Image (spheres, grey):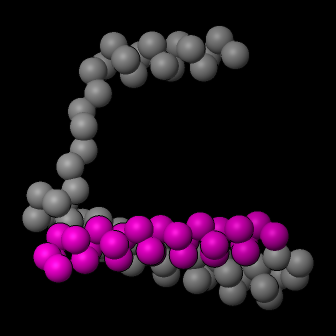
Amino acid sequence: MEDKDLMEKELLIIKGVADLYLHGTIESSTAEVHTAFKDALNETLDIQNKIYTLMAEKGWYKMQNVDQTKIDATKQKFANK
C-alpha cells in the first residue's frame, strides 16, 4: 500500500474519532466527563491537522478553488434567510 493511501485512511479514521469525541463532549452529563472528552477532541484535532499539513505539503490533499462569484452568491443566499 502506498504512503498516500495510508495517510488518507489515517485521516479518515482520525476524522471519525474526532466526530465521536465531539458528540461525547456535547452529550456529557458531568463537568469531568465533558473536560475529558474536550481534551481528547482537542488532541485529536491537533493530530488531524498534522496529518492534513503533511498531506498538503506532499501534494496529496488537493483543494478546489471556488470562483468568488459562487462564494458571493452563497453568502447572499444565506443572508436572505
Q: Is residue 7 above or below residue 76?
A: below
Pick whichever, 26 or 19, lies toward us: 19
Q: Looking at the picture, how far across and down is residue 25, in whole percent?
A: 72, 73
Q: Give the image location of residue 14, x and y in percent.
A: 45, 74
Q: Where is 68 relative to 52, above or below?
A: above
The furthest residue to the right: 29
The number of numbered badges drawn on the structure is 0
Question: Which residue is located at x 13 percent, y 63 percent?
Answer: 57
- Relative to 71, 33 lies left or right: right
Secondary structure that dominates the magenta span: helix
Q: Using the rendered view, name the quadrant where residue 64 is placed.
A: top left
Q: Nearer the viewer, residue 67 or 8?
A: 8
In-image side of 42 versus 47 (left or right): right
Q: Quadrant of the C terminus?
A: top right
- Residue 42 visible, this angle: no
Does 13 lie within the magenta span?
Answer: yes
Residue closest to the eye, 77 or 11: 11
Answer with left or right where residue 29 lies relative to residue 5.
right
Which quarter shows the N terminus?
A: bottom left
36 in relation to 2, above or below: below
Q: Quadrant of residue 55?
A: bottom left
> Does the magenta portion include 4?
yes
Furthest residue in direction left, as rendered: 58
Looking at this rendering, what residue extends furthest in the front direction? Answer: 1
| Span highlighted in magenta in the image | 1-27
Tell me the residue at 82%/76% (across/down): 28
Residue at left offset 29%, top offset 68%: 8
Quarter residue 73 falls in? top left
- From the top left corner, tell me how far across and down residue 66 is, in percent: 29, 27
Q: Is residue 75 visible?
A: yes
